[in-house]
Image (cartoon, grey):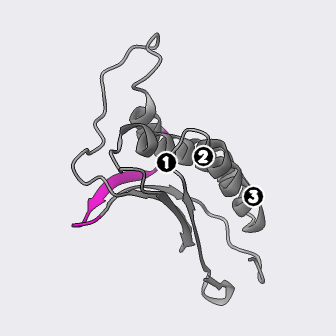
Amino acid sequence: MTSPTCGALSRAFTLSPTPQSVPGGRKWVRQLLDRWDLGEIKWRAELLVTELIANAIKHAQTGGAPVTVLVMYAAGTLRIEVRDRDTDNLPVRRRSTPEDENGHGLLLVETYSDRWNVRLNERNKTVWADLDTPSRLKAGAR
């Protein structure tokens, strides 16, 4: 729903739970932030959505259910949410060394977001990350 007059925007899309979906999710967010004129946080948003999607696909036991990505902008904050159907496996920050190939995802999310957390309900797990920005949307942004 686009509502430039109140300065709030949101978009959602669904991905198949395969590693090949990660680059498509990153590209989608990049193009969306270009349309919303939020280029100054684009690289951070791309990094966050990459990590959140990859973690959902790698660690969530969804039985092949899709992963949903929701991106919202309001009141100077961009929120990225990645939702899957695995409510049993919560994200866990691992102790890893720089030499480890895995285990850095949540550290990156923690480092490059302004806030992040996990929200559960009986059907879904949502991992979200916020990016604060002083940008104001141009009139007519879609």
| Other residues around mark 1 within 10 Å, as few (<14) / some (14–19) / many (≥20) | many
Left or right: 105 with respect to 41? left
Tell me whether circle 1 and circle 2 mark residues in contact (CB < 8 Å): yes
Q: Which residues are magenta?
A: 112-123
**Disc number placed over residue 21 in the picture, else none:** 2
**Disc number placed over residue 31 in the picture, else none:** 3
Where residue 65 sits in the image (x, y, percent)? 42, 56
C-alpha span from label 3 to label 1: 21 Å
Viewer-nearest of discs 2 and 3: 2
**Disc number placed over residue 17 in the picture, else none:** 1
- Residue shown at the point (43%, 40%) measured from the top left: 55
C-alpha span from label 1 to label 2: 7 Å
Q: Say if residue 80 shows up in the picture.
A: no
Q: Say if residue 30 shows up in the picture.
A: yes
Where residue 22 sits in the image (x, y, percent)? 59, 43
Where, by quadrant of the figure, is residue 90 drawn? top left
- Residue shown at the point (71%, 50%) measured from the top left: 27
- Residue shown at the point (28%, 36%) measured from the top left: 92
Q: Amino acid at mark 2?
A: Ser
Q: Amino acid at mark 3?
A: Gln
